[in-house]
Image (spheres, helix red, strand yellow):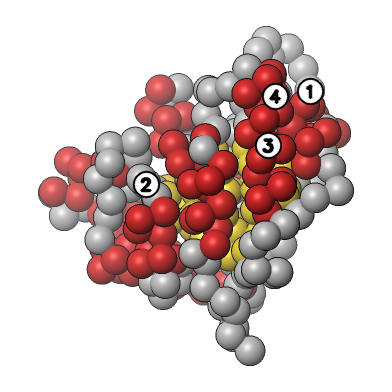
Amino acid sequence: MSKPRSLIAGNWKMNGLSADGWALADAIVQGARDLPAGRAELLVCPPATLIGLVAEAVTGSPVALGGQDCHADRSGAHTGDVSAAMLADLGCRYVIVGHSERRADHGESSATVRAKAEAAQAAGLSAIVCVGETWAEREAGKTEEVVTAQVAESLPAASTSGNLVVAYEPVWAIGSGRTATPEQVAEVHALIRRQLGSRMDDAGAVRILYGGSVKPANAVELLAVAHVDGALVGGSSLKAGDFLAIAAAAPAQAG
């Protein structure tokens, strides 16, 4: 099976006011026109306050829109939360769930992540399910144990390549400037691919992204690793030039 088309997803996190969001989205849209056709799919995930504005900026462009989180329920008494149906209503096609910052800062368990991913898929969105170990867990030799458990417990049973993306983000590399080596990335991505293969028929077409201090300087090397089908980009997604450079580093599809 040929390598899936790369997905380069920008997680803006809690950054940006209206003018910033419009300018960044517009710059990405304009720059996307100069990228090799069909090389990579671009996705931006702004904070909830900017989704409607960014939706206008990316309409009619090759840049897709996503949310950074969703509630497991479609509606209800959940002050401050946003449902997957609401994201879809604004034009989102993806939503990130289970990011390590949500797991750590909000105490989200893998069961909670799975419920959110199920809600996303029910709303017609693709869930980008994040998994990854801490530095202490890696140092203790528990990377395989931790990632295996998170994948097993976080992915909805009805997942397919059409409604699921998995993102491996070693917690110790997020925002730290420290990046996993290609060998470390290859090992964990191969592990995830094997797990997917035991769960679904089209596992080879499910995109597995790497995240954790991805920059233009290391993008070519990381995106060339086996079973790396794109990147979940944090800080570098806030600069259009850097984000577009990472997208330009995506390898051409074979065949």
Marker disc for residue 25: 3
**Cα–Cα span, label 2 and label 3:** 22 Å
Residue 195 spot, x, y in % from top left: 45, 67
Report if the CB atoms under discs 2 and 1 are less than 8 Å apart. no
Q: Where is residue 78 shown, x and y percent of the image?
A: 68, 14
Q: Residue type at mark 4?
A: Leu
Viewport quadrant of the C terminus: bottom right
Disc 3 to disc 4, how far (Cα)?
10 Å
In the rendered image, the residue lying farthest to the bottom is 255
Label 3 Cα crowd, 10 Å radius (few <14 / some 14-19 / many 20+)? many
- Camera-side residue: 249 or 167? 249
Screen quadrant of the N terminus? bottom right
- Confirm whether residue 168 shows in the render: no
Q: Choose the circle earlier in sequence order: 2 or 4.
A: 4
Look at mark 2 in the image and give the residue it sits on.
Answer: 212
Q: CA distance from mark 4 to mark 1?
A: 20 Å
Within the image, what quadrant is residue 75 found in? Answer: top right
Which mark is in front, 1 or 3? 3
Is 179 left or right of 203, judged from the image as shown?
left
Q: Residue at x 16, y 55 (%)?
A: 141
Circle 1 — which element? loop
- Which comes sooner in the sequence, label 2 or label 3? 3
Classify mark 2: residues with Cα within 10 Å, few (<14), some (14-19) or many (20+). Answer: many
Q: CA distance from mark 2 to mark 1?
A: 33 Å
Secondary element at image label 4: helix
Residue located 54% across and 62% down the image: 248
Which residue is denoted by mark 4 in the rendering?
50
